[in-house]
Image (tube, rainbow, N blue to C red):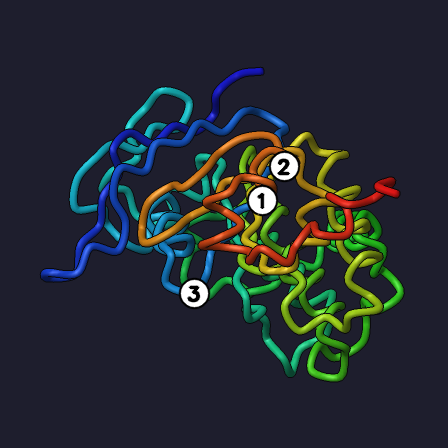
Amino acid sequence: MDVILETRDLKRTFGAVVAAHNINIRIHAGEVMGVIGSNGAGKTTFVNMVTGYLPPSSGEILYRGKSMIGLPTRVITRKGIARSFQIPQLFQELTVIDNMLIALTIADNPAPPVFKPAIDRRLEGRAIEALERFGIAQHAHREVGTLAQGIRKLIDIAMATVSDPALLFLDEPTSGVSADEKMEFMGTLIEALKSSDTAVLFIEHDMEIVEAFSPRVVAFYEGTILADGPTAEVLTNDKVREFVIGTEFHRTADTEGVA
């Protein structure tokens, strides 16, 4: 698979505090990767640097072999790197379809002329298609603020994908989704993104979600990468179990079949 994103010795400091260092990651086209680590481990700092919300103190960020250092977030998005946030970035008082139309209008017109409508109704067909991909078209004409958290998250992610990104970062996509709905929610999400061959990197604290949906896992600890590899190997790594997920995780799986 082609490497679409590579970081080399990426580092970020805040004064004397080192938030991230020696971050070396390669992400391939169409890949699904989970990112784990405790709060403050450097996960979001890494995503913020790659998506332009935070400049690195040193190191390289290469997208399809070209440097992304110093580019504004909107330029990075137009080049093919998108993200969603832990808290959905939506217009709560507008309908779902209007939120989608705003996202599509911006994607199609990066610098829209002044005095033009913020919503282009001619894009409604594409908006409905995007909602159908994520299984939420039935909510198209409902006000966003009246919907459940899981639906709002899917809307936010659908909006992030209207520009057909090659790489999508998801910050805790199942946060706020009820425990009995998480698996179905994540299944819907991953299936929708597979249809576009988008590479997905998602930050997640629920190890059952990581096991079920991520073939590869990167574990962060104290601002650096503790482990990177196939999910089963990373989640049974001694250091990952000690510093990230706890030794209790996998105990049942480890002893399964033992008399």
Quarter of the rendering occupied by the N terminus: top right
Q: Give, as a three-letter code, the residue at label 2.
A: Thr
The percent position of residue 168, horizontal first and vertical second, equals 55, 43
| Residue, disc 3 | 39
| Nearer to us: label 1 or label 2 | 2
Kindly indicate whether the residue at mark 2 contacts the one at mark 1 (C-beta within 8 angstroms): yes
Toward which corner of the image does residue 75 lie, by quadrant?
top left
| Up/down of 219 relative to 37, above or below | above
Task: Give the label on residue 231, or none.
Answer: 2
In the rendered structure, are the residues bearing label 1 and label 3 in contact, judged by CB atoms less than 8 Å apart?
Answer: no
Q: Quadrant of the C terminus?
A: top right
Q: CA distance from mark 1 to mark 3?
A: 15 Å
The x, y position of residue 45, in whole percent, is 34, 54
Which secondary structure, mark 3?
loop
The one of 52 and 180 positioned closer to us in this rendering: 180
For residue 61, side relative to residue 247 (left or right):
left
Would you place residue 90 above or below residue 124 in this image?
Answer: below
x 54%, y 53%: residue: 203
Amino acid type shown at disc 3: Asn
Residue under pointer 1: 34
Residue 124 locus on image (x, y percent): 75, 55
Other-residue count near label 2 (Cα within 10 Å), few / some / many at <14 / 14–19 / ≥20: many
First of labels 1, 2 by sequence position: 1
**Pointer 1 or 3: first along the chain:** 1
Q: Real-space Cα distance between discs 1 and 2?
A: 8 Å
Q: Earlier in the sequence, mark 2 or mark 3?
A: 3
